[in-house]
């Protein structure tokens, strides 16, 4: 039997009237569904995206469907830290109840960012960790929550201190998974002792979105459509993260084999205390370099 998404939302969400959700990757394959679901819960949405035209087009679509929706757009390029700082400057004095870190890139040509890391690592990890850290004062005012979208691909990564961002790795899945592992473990450590800002780590399992960049796109699309949940269903794992309270060493994802079924809470895959500490310390060191650079 197909899942009735509206019925699931009615049972698993509450009214968010007066609450503000800031989301990266709002116009992506999963982001679009998350935004729609939270608008139905009466949240005000602030979309952070690089492509302003896509945001404007999506906003128009949403307002046709939800005429009373409150939607704003702020441009951000997660591969450019100055752009992240500009977005922070627009948000830091605003009300923020939820910050959803949903943006991500996979299997793209690797380039080197301003701070010497590849663009996948910069976009998926550094900029979004930095964004969350910079917005903590705004989130403190509302006792808000960070919802970070990670991936089961994070199993492919293990800390390699000789190749932090996996630039020398030939497999796109490992480059991507490593960036998600850094985001997962660094945020987990950042928020584990806090009670003024909460964290929910979530993953969508496997689903077909525009981020998939396969050589045989048609065949891959057909296989994924037949075998894996639709993006609208996968996105419910992110929505669940907004409403469910979980521990720092847990995440929310599909129930069966981490791929199929309804959102459920489970333990994060094992990581040693040493790896956690090293990844967190690297994250903090990178942020200090960024902040020092910005002070000149």
Image (cartoon, rainbow, N blue to C red):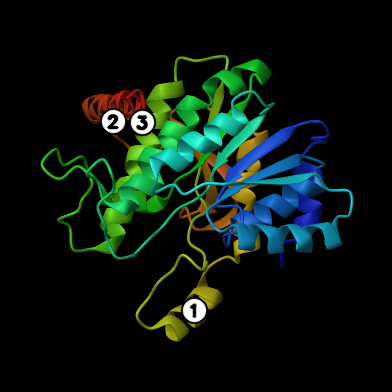
Viewer-closest of 274 and 110: 110
C-alpha span from label 2 to label 3: 12 Å
Q: Which residue is mark 1?
A: 221
What residue is at 64 percent from the left and 42 percent from the top?
Answer: 240
Q: Kindly give the residue lying farthest to the left in the view shown.
A: 162
Please tell me which of labels 3 and 1 falls first in the chain: 3
In the rendered image, the vertical position of residue 147 relative to residue 109, given as above or below: above
Viewer-closest of 268 and 124: 124
Label placed on residue 286: 2
* The N terminus, quarter of image: bottom right
Residue 234 visible in the picture: yes
Residue 143: image quadrant is: top right
Q: Look at discs 1 and 2 and give the one toward the viewer.
A: 2
Q: Kindly give the residue lying farthest to the front in the view shown.
A: 296
Q: Which residue is mark 3?
A: 186
Q: Kindly give the residue lying farthest to the right in the view shown.
A: 68
């Amino acid at each position: 039997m197909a899942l009735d998404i509206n019925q699931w939302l009615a049972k698993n969400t509450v009214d968010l009237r007066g609450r503000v959700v800031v989301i990266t990757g709002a116009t992506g394959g999963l982001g679009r569904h998350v935004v729609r679901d939270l608008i139905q819960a009466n949240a005000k949405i602030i979309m952070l995206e690089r492509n302003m035209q896509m945001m404007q087009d999506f906003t128009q679509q949403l307002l046709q469907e939800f005429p009373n929706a409150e939607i704003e757009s702020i441009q951000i390029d997660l591969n450019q830290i100055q752009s992240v700082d500009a977005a922070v400057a627009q948000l830091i004095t605003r009300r923020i109840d939820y910050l959803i870190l949903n943006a991500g890139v996979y299997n793209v040509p690797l380039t080197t960012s301003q701070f010497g890391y590849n663009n996948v690592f910069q976009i998926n990890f550094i900029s979004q960790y930095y964004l969350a850290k910079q917005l903590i004062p705004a989130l403190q005012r509302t006792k808000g929550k960070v919802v970070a979208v990670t991936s089961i691909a994070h199993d492919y990564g293990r800390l390699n201190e000789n190749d932090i961002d996996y630039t020398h790795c030939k497999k796109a899945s490992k480059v991507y998974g490593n960036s998600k592992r850094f985001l997962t473990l660094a945020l987990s450590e950042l928020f584990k002792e806090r009670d003024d800002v909460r964290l929910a780590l979530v993953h969508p399992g496997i689903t077909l979105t525009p981020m998939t960049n396969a050589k045989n796109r048609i065949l891959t699309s057909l296989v994924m459509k037949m075998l894996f949940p639709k993006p609208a269903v996968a996105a419910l794992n992110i929505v669940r993260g907004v409403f469910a309270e979980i521990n720092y060493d847990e995440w929310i994802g599909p129930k069966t084999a981490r791929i199929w079924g309804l959102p459920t809470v489970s333990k994060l895959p094992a990581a040693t205390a040493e790896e956690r500490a090293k990844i967190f310390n690297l994250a903090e060191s990178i942020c200090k370099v960024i902040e020092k650079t910005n002070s000149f």
